[in-house]
Image (cartoon, rainbow, N blue to C red):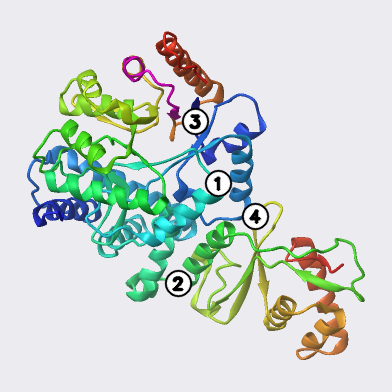
Amino acid sequence: MVGIGFRKDFSDEFLLGNALKPDFIEVAPENWMGIGGYWKKVFKEATEKYPLFLHGLSLSVGSPDKLDYNFLSNIKKFIQEYKPLVYSEHLSFSKCDNAHLYDLLPIPFTGDAVKHVANRIKQVQEFLEQKIAIEIVSYYTPVAAEMSELEFVNAVLAEADCDLLLDVNNVYVNAFNHDYNPKEFIKNLDLDRVKYIHMAGHTKVADDLIIDTHGEAIIDPVYELFDFSMQLIQKDVPVLLERDFNIPELPELQQEINRLKAIKTKALKNTAYATA
Amino acid sequence: MQLLDSTYQHQSKFAQFCRSGEYVAIPGVKEKNIGRYRKLIYNIVDDSLRSTYPLTYDLLEDQEWESLVDEFFSSHRCQSPMLWQMPKELMDYMQETDHKLLHTYEFLSDLLLLEWYEVEIYMMEDKAIPTFKIEGNMLRDSFVINPELSILSLTYPVHLKNASKIISEDKGQYFVCLHRESETGKVQFTDIKYPHIELLEKLSNEESGFDDLLEIFQKYATKEEATIALSQFLNSALKSKLILGFSN
């Protein structure tokens, strides 16, 4: 399966036309929960046509604050209503000192943070009565790190016993920004936990800095890293094309989806898994 | 194991920098890159506020708008996990702090209210739409009101005039009804007066026909005037879908 991040910007053309045919759609529940009117109708139509994946923004599993059970309860109701195939969140924090920040901030790579975050993920999984997938986020500076990013991610996954959302573009971005080998990083992740993959474009803003904008087409080195990842994972995990800004004509997005499918099919052709 | 205070402090300083732009050293942080977070977050908040309050944004000087957004995001702790709901907190913040801009522009609080309610009515969860028929007899059948509405009481006519044209002499008592068209989801504005408010309340609470509604209008005018005014209002409300139709 290769899906697309469902955006209001292209919803009409997408739902009325045939230019874009993903296998599923992904949305941020925060943008669609508790609403009615026009967008509720559009969302309903989209979810009647396509399987749904949810990718949360505001749960803030890495926050020092207490978990927001009221919000989590709304997420649970939304999950029960729309029955998404996956609910994922970010390995980051977006709330601190009781203030939402509406973006994903890097958690300090420390031992106590591993325990704290893993415990919160466990609480979330217990409350939702399902495993969740956690995404490795892109980051532009480390914060008081006492261990490597890889050690931090693997430790959280093991301690929380959660699934991994492998955002291949984020690994590429982080490897560039923090000067490590992205293939080595991926090779040493606990790949058995990969439940879901994200692919996206990015923007290079300085000689030594890439920002994860989701505003450009995927570049070849990221496709290559995806190919490399699929060869290692050897499982038919769903893949999402994210495009949030600077959205091109829909056939261009379909071409990206086709290329992702082709890479995935080729990587898995010698295995027992059939690709969808 | 609890999060160590040192880890919490690092996160808190990072978050505080993103909210205020005031950096306090954090170990290991690349100072030249942390500003990206502040910029990205500020843009997200600014975009969300501009799209909710386009008229307020147009009204204020650039410097006033920027200072407002900056002050709001750094002093106020945003509570909504849903970004689209966050702008309501700006309106509440300005009221709670008796913000100086509310004195510079005496109609600003009405403008913010009107702009926020347009978003709220547009986005609010669906209400059960009662069954109704489009065709009916104005004089005999009961009317079915659109339940997706809200009535605002204003001191300045921000729903009638461009904000930049409003003057002190416009101060008075105004009412506007906002309703959502169920088919298109669009929000419509209707300038209303006392009898219309009573009419809308009556229709919201009980099935009522022309004669019941005429009683309300007759409190404010002669029977002849009331009949004309009521007929005009009902026709207009049926057209705008504020009144959906007639009961079956």
Element under label 3?
strand
The reply to the same-chain question for discs 1 and 3 is: yes
Q: Are marks 3 and 2 in contact (CB under 8 Å)?
A: no
Mark 1 vs mark 2, foreground winner is: 1
Marks 4/1: CA distance? Answer: 25 Å
Element under label 4?
loop
Q: Tell me, for residue B186, which label it has, or none.
A: 4
Q: Are marks 4 and 1 in contact (CB under 8 Å)?
A: no
Q: Mark 3 = which residue?
A: A4
Marks 1/3: CA distance? Answer: 17 Å
Marks 1/2: CA distance? Answer: 38 Å
Mark 3 vs mark 2, foreground winner is: 3
Stretch in magenta: A228-241
Relative image position of residue B21 (x, y in whole percent): 20, 52
Relative image position of residue A30 (x, y in whole percent): 45, 50
Q: Chain of mark 2?
A: B
Eyeballing the image, is B126 above or below A118? below
Q: Are marks 4 and 3 in contact (CB under 8 Å)?
A: no
Q: Mark 1 = which residue?
A: A82
Mark 4 vs mark 1, foreground winner is: 1
Q: Amino acid at mark 1?
A: Tyr
Q: Chain of mark 1?
A: A
- What residue is rendered at 16% in x and 44% in y? A108
Element under label 2?
helix
Q: Chain of mark 3?
A: A
Q: Amino acid at mark 2?
A: Ser
The reply to the same-chain question for discs 4 and 3 is: no
Find out whether residue A240 is within the magenta segment.
yes
- What residue is rendered at 34% in x and 47% in y? B43
Q: Amino acid at mark 4?
A: Lys
